[in-house]
Amino acid sequence: MGAAACGEGDGTLRATDESSGGLVLLPSFRFARPHSELNGRRIFITTGGDLVCEHGELPSTISTWLQREKAAERSGHSPPPRASICDCRTSKGLNSAGSPGQAAKPPKSLFDHLCSLEMPTITVHGREARQVPFTHGNQTTFLTTMGDLVCRHGRKRQTLGNKRWKEGAVSKGIACSCAPPPFPFRKSLVGVRLGRYGGQYGKTACPPVGQ
Ligand SMILES: [Zn+2]
Ligand SMILES: [Zn+2]
């Protein structure tokens, strides 16, 4: 079943498509699949064969955060913020190497994965674009078949950041307050194709449901 779960404020924040071998896009934008469980914590294995927590973070990253937080506590300071929704208090269980044969297979493209998740769509210049998980509010981002990242009005970041365009848009009353974040948010998507090139102009980019 193509269970689509784009956790919006439900605490799980996971985009999973069980129809494609349990491949999951974790909040760190790493593709992974379930590997094991330890003390009720789910462990995932990435396409590169690394074990990560359910937020998609590596044990070395979690250990660094924990060290910094302990140091802050010792000196009576408030803990430095983590650049992640990860709140793991331990990296236990993540340090054993996963075998390469267990690694998750990457999707054909991020766009294809968003299609299998049945993420919301908009049309940009006649082409389909799909919402990127974990993006909300004015940071809501859509990915076009060509791999472009746009705001919910179909505008690229470069356009939104262009001062001259902005002034013109304000005077025409068509400006928006969108601020899609840079992408990929993390280096995790290196090697994964974003768009699906060759999507036919004007035609729906996703295969009919059930194929
Ligand atoms: Zn975590
Ligand atoms: Zn916009």
Image: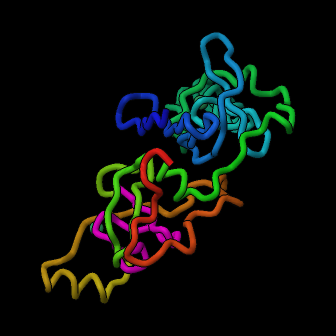
Is residue 85 magenta-colored?
A: no
Image x and y of residue 177, in percent: 25, 66
Instruction: Please state the extent of the stretch shown in magenta in the rendering.
Output: 140-159
Left or right: 163 with respect to 173?
right
Image x and y of residue 96, in percent: 84, 26
At 43% from the left and 78% from the top, the residue drawn is: 201
Image x and y of residue 92, in percent: 73, 20
Q: Quadrant for ligand 1?
A: top right
At 53% from the left and 38% from the top, the residue drawn is: 17
Q: Residue furthest top?
A: 39
At 46% from the left and 44% from the top, the residue drawn is: 210
Q: How many marks?
A: 0
For residue 69, which quarter of the picture?
Answer: top right
Toward the viewer: 83 or 14? 14
Image x and y of residue 132, in percent: 44, 54
Left or right: 110 with respect to 52?
left
